[in-house]
Image: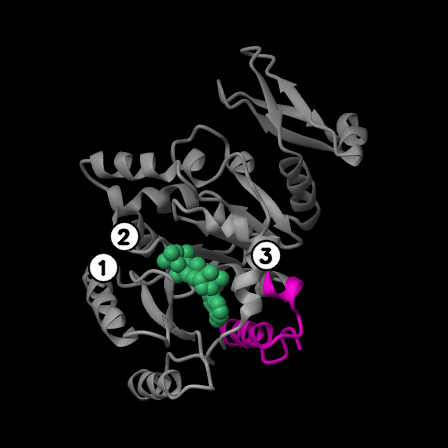
């Protein structure tokens, strides 16, 4: 079977017979290619080859995916934890998922135990072809990683005279039809990249930590989202996910009841406080792999059911 490898230097596309590298793939060996056009030598990621093979077998998807932005300006509220575990849960439920990390901290890749050599930055600068920027993290789950290199991307976006807010959409629209869901993890704060995420995604999921002053952070975020919606009506707040729910103390339950009254349509089942959730990333595992029987795994399964509207998902 033939697959396509793109030279990162001259962008020449080469057809390669997968059978010729089959043995190296099965032995997990490094594959280095040399471009016949410019003679540039470059490493080829095994994930890329395997992904292409799988996608050929499954046939390309042509419909638009659901695009969910996991975001809130406030830091440490569970954005990355939710993005990673929602993505992992959707993948386990049989959906094809792309997790996009738009944070310079690069925590999403870390949480899945991956250290990709390329990611969103290379995609946006067109340094590499999409197949080389996306890595397969699990069955049904692919990753477009973030990290420090995104700092330069922010500068590039800032320097654009017009259309800056569409930079991410332009790159993603070319490749996202292969997935059922694109889940986007965002950085804390508010900058051009956050604006780009909200111009690309259509559904907004906000994790709200039930620990400290969550309502203030949420109302500030609502104002910023409102400003975006003036220009981008498709982007709507769909889910408010309370996090760090601790039933042993009164505070979180009280804040949750307030949120429930304010946003009855949007509120989701809370994610309970769980030490396993904070330990799982250092093992590079989702909660379903690290502690499948824990309360947080049950809560994230519930979130998957809510998002997919499938009550029997992951039962
Ligand atoms: N329900 C939970 N119970 C216990 N610990 C949690 C829970 N949710 C998240 N954590 C832990 O809290 C910390 C902050 O979570 P996370 O990194 O997901 O927040 P964030 O909003 O992405 O942060 P940032 O704004 O810095 O990107 C992490 O160490 C994470 O493992
Ligand atoms: Mg984060």
Residue picked out by circle 2: 195
Circles 1, 3 touching at the beta carbon (< 8 Å): no
Query: Disc 2, disc 1: CB below 8 Å?
Result: yes
Category of crowding for the residue at label 1, using alpha-carbon neighbours closer than 10 angstroms: few (below 14), some (14–19), many (at least 20)? some
Q: Looking at the picture, how far across and down is residue 98, in whole percent?
A: 52, 52
Which sits earlier in the primary sequence, circle 3 or circle 2? 3
Residue 176 pos. (x, y %): 48, 49
Whole-angstrom CA distance, mark 3 to mark 2, is 25 Å
Mark number, residue 96: 3
Split into 4 quadrants, where in the image is the C terminus? bottom right
Quadrant for residue 15, please give it: top right
Q: Which residue is mark 1?
A: 228
Q: Is residue 159 left or right of residue 314?
A: left
Residue 67 can be seen, yes or no: no
Residue at point 46% right, 79% down? 270
Label 3 sits on a secondary structure element that is loop
Using the image, tell me which numbered label, if any, was put on residue 50.
Answer: none
Asked if residue 301 is among those painted magenta in the image, a careful observer would answer yes
Task: Reply yes or no: does residue 131 show up in magenta.
Answer: no
Q: Which residues are magenta?
A: 286-315
Task: Specify whether tag 3 is near ligand 2 (CB below 8 Å).
Answer: no
């Amino acid at each position: 079977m033939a697959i396509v490898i793109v030279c990162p230097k001259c962008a020449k596309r080469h057809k390669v017979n997968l059978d010729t590298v089959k043995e190296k793939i099965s032995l997990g060996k490094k594959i280095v290619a040399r471009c016949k056009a410019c003679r540039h030598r470059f490493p080829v990621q095994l994930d890329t080859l395997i992904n292409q093979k799988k996608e050929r077998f499954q046939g390309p998807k042509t419909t638009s995916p659901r695009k969910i932005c996991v975001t809130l300006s406030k830091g440490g509220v569970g954005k990355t934890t939710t993005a990673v575990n929602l993505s992992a849960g959707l993948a386990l439920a049989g959906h094809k998922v792309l997790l996009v990390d738009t944070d310079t901290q690069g925590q999403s890749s870390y949480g899945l135990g991956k250290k990709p050599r390329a990611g969103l930055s290379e995609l946006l600068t067109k340094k590499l072809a999409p197949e080389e920027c996306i890595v397969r993290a699990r069955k049904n789950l692919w990753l477009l990683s973030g990290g420090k290199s995104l700092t330069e991307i922010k500068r590039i976006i800032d320097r654009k005279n017009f259309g800056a807010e569409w930079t991410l959409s332009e790159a993603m629209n070319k490749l996202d039809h292969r997935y059922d869901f694109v889940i986007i993890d965002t950085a804390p704060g508010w900058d051009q990249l956050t604006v780009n995420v909200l111009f690309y995604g259509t559904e907004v999921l906000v994790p709200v930590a039930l620990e400290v002053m969550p309502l203030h952070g949420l109302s500030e975020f609502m104002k910023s989202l409102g400003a975006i919606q003036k220009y981008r009506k498709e982007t709507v707040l769909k889910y408010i996910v309370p996090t760090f729910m601790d039933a042993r103390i009164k505070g979180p339950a009280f804040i949750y009841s307030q949120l429930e009254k304010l946003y009855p349509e949007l509120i989701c089942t809370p994610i309970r406080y769980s030490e396993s959730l904070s330990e799982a990333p250092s093992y590079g595992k989702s909660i379903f792999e690290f502690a499948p029987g824990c309360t947080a795994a049950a809560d994230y399964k519930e979130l998957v059911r809510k998002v997919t509207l499938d009550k029997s998902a992951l039962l």
